[in-house]
Image (spheres, rainbow, N blue to C red):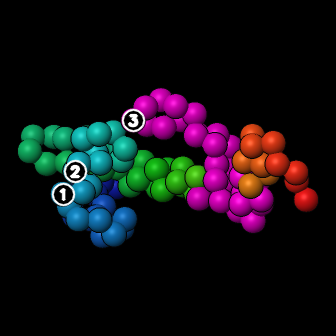
Amino acid sequence: MVKTLTAEEVGEILKLTRTSVTVKAKSGEIPGMKIGNRWIFLEVDLLAYIRSQYKCAQGGKEEICRSTNVRIRPTGGSKSRHQVESEYSKALGLKIK
């Protein structure tokens, strides 16, 4: 049987207020559906959403921005600062150490 969650329960899991959960659900960021005047969330969809966020946090492959449909390159990690400095140096014509 599929377990459903309320906006309050999703908020507890994601550490968000009920209002934040419903705003994110309305925008399509969090998967959910409104039945009558209540938001309902499927536990399996919420878990898939949470797992999808791991890729972003761990420097996964390029993602598509949900609001602008622009490709986003992963950031972070131990090499990113050096890569940015190298790219700036190349763009400015500076010698690279």
First to last magenta residue range = 57-84
Identify the residue shown where x is 77% and y is 59%.
82
Q: Is residue 81 placed above or below 33 in the rendered structure?
A: below
| Image x and y of residue 73, in percent | 63, 43
Question: Label 1 belongs to which residue?
Answer: 19
For badge 1, the amino acid type reads Thr
Q: Is residue 8 left or right of residue 70?
A: left
Q: Main secondary structure of the magenta part?
A: loop
Are the residues tagged 3 and 1 within 8 Å (C-beta)?
A: no
Identify the residue shown where x is 37% and y is 44%.
29
Q: Earlier in the sequence, mark 2 or mark 3?
A: 2
Residue that lies at the very extreme toward the left in this rendered image: 37
Are the residues tagged 2 and 1 within 8 Å (C-beta)?
A: yes
Q: How many marks?
A: 3
Verify whether residue 29 appears in magenta: no
| Image x and y of residue 35, in percent | 16, 40
| Image x and y of residue 5, in percent | 28, 57
Front residue of this view, candidates 4 and 8: 8
Question: Label 3 belongs to which residue?
Answer: 67
Front residue of this view, candidates 80 and 85: 85
Q: Residues within 10 Å of mark 2 (few under 14, many from 20)?
A: many
For badge 2, the amino acid type reads Thr
